[in-house]
Amino acid sequence: MLVNTYTKSSIHRLLLSGFLPVPVDFFLEQEPMRIQSLFAAFVLGALMAVPATKPANAQRLSADGAPQTFHFVSDQYFSEVYFHFSPTSGTQAGLHQYDTQLEDYSATNIQRQIAALHIYEKKLTAIDPSALDASVAGDYQILLNSIHSQLLSLEVIRNWEKNPDNYSSGITNSIFVLMERPFAPVNTRLRSAIEREKLIPQVFSEARKNLKNPPRIFTEIALEQVDGLISFFQKDVPSAFADATDAQAKTDFVHTNAAVIQALKDYGAWMRSDLLARSNGDYKLGAETFARKLAYDEMVDIPLDHLLEIAYADLHKNQAEFARIAKELDPAKTPQEVLAELATIHPAPDKLLDAFHATFNDLIAFIDAHHIITIPSTVQPTLEETPPFMRATTFASMDPPGPFETRSTKAYFNVTLPEKSWAQAHVAEHMASFNVGTIISTSVHEAYPGHYVQFLWMPEFPSNIRKVLGANSNIEGWAHYTEQMMLDEGYAAPPAGATGATPEQIREAKLIRLGQLQDALLRDARFVNSIKLHTGQFTFDEAVDFFVKEGYQSHSVGLVETKRGSADATYLYYTLGKLEIMKLREDLKTKQGSAFNLQAFHNDFMRQGFAPIKIIRKAMLHDSSPVL
């Protein structure tokens, strides 16, 4: 979406690695499907995770059966490490034996996690990847990269010592995943919430011990969030369990929930009176760590200066196209003036959900008629208003069930409506994000053929590894790619033929393209800022200005986007992934010639799961050619 939709999968990945402050839809646009259920731990190259030389015992393991060894080790890893240290992700994935457990945030437990990750790193490097078939070898790389990324986050980046919102928003997410979908009777889920709530006050005790000289911006963000989290436990959590009939559980919940509210209030007061004044740390990763993280997360090891050249080239191309179309619409106005006019063309707030729903059948019909991609199900996502505690940080998001969820299988398309208490100016600013163009691009991105269609293809993914772990350059790259692809293929184009198109139809088509380009420029600005912020080439204020001047965003959006970028360092993955997919498509078209088929390309891409594009290129092109 335009500004506020973070794939919940990407968010959970960042939380799991100790990097991102917020559990769901953190700052803007994100969509990382949000897919809260695709929770994932995506992660870095220049030092590729697969070792260049075989371990001494590789031949022995190969002879003993490397494939069987790998499958055993990977299954063992998920039960003994991945879900063990992140039970919330187990709930999100649909594995409900974890529902009563909560993450142990203590420094001692973090050291246990680090030790466990090193053990499994050694177990994997003892396996010869050349003895695995191509698909399993890809899984091997994904799993080893994920372990390396978590170790980088825990041992080098160390956000468990730097980001106070990891704790407050982390515990909130742990309760939210028990509320959001009815995978079990309400009494059962309430009892699980009680067990988690009993453990929450200790989390803030560990936070006070762990946090050392955080960046000021991280503490400020945590303070901005905390009142909303308190309100969530005061209002939303009791409301979610209002239908419970277990009298003892209801009594217990009153006590545990009150304790959580008080613990959050005390934590907020401590941050204001103590932590903020000593928050003088640096949020920047630095070039080396940034490059390693990018290589582990996305399997992209392109030098950062070359990545910046790629980012600027796409930015300038989109700016030029925006200017061309804006001039056609009104030669007397600047592109920014045309953009300001576009911001006023939106449905009434009480018609916003209807406007999104109205796009579904039209998008599906176009996809089917033009053979864009196979849609595996006729069931549509459920449109609803964004849950209250997520409304401050997201405009729209897709929230499908986890890959192993069997009891509650609805996917929710969340849209944030203006609050009734808002001033008219605030309502207008909010609704500008839902103009005639961005409603289309958001529906494409979140639903058809974006994140929702990705979710529908999940049963065909080749392994559980590719359902649980993934690359945001694939997940978000695909959704962002579809925004442009659909228009390029003719969606929303004015009608042709003998009767031609009316001036109003031509104008609407151009406005829709401007909305898509505005979204593209936002992602281009993220691409540039992610690198320049974390390598010291931009100050915080310079990054905000870049979003405004070059990304065609408001100052308020630029500020929130820059805040997000301080924590979500590699949020360049939208445009990065889109360009990787476009290059893969063109390379395959060159190779196949007249035999190339767009629907077959998209279907084959979906079947690869959420793997980094480098792995998908090898599977589809059968070579190791560059991703960009």
Image (spheres, rainbow, N blue to C red):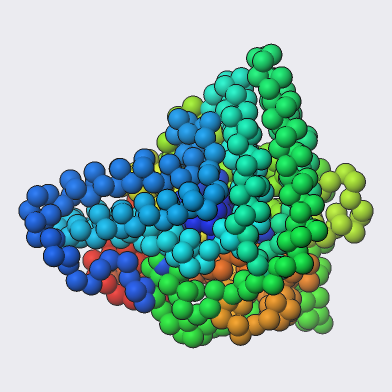
Asked if 568 appears above or below 461 in the picture, the reply is below
What residue is rendered at 87% in x and 57% in y? 426
- The percent position of residue 5, horizontal first and vertical second, equals 63, 55
Q: Nearer the viewer, residue 118 or 360?
A: 118
Instruction: State whether residue 513 appears in this view.
Output: no
Query: Which of the 4 image quarters holds residue 230?
Result: top right
Q: Quadrant of the N terminus?
A: bottom right
Asked if 257 appears above or below 428 in the picture, the reply is above
Instruction: State whether residue 258 appears in this view.
Output: yes
What residue is rendered at 31% in x and 53% in y? 120
In screen coordinates, is 584 left or right of 22?
Answer: left
Q: Nearer the viewer, residue 598 or 139?
A: 139
- The percent position of residue 617, horizontal first and vertical second, equals 32, 66
- The percent position of residue 298, horizontal first and vertical second, equals 42, 65
Q: Nearer the viewer, residue 11 or 438?
A: 11
- The percent position of residue 14, horizontal first and vertical second, equals 53, 57
Asked if 554 appears above or below 39 in the picture, the reply is below
Asked if 403 appears above or below 489 in the picture, the reply is above
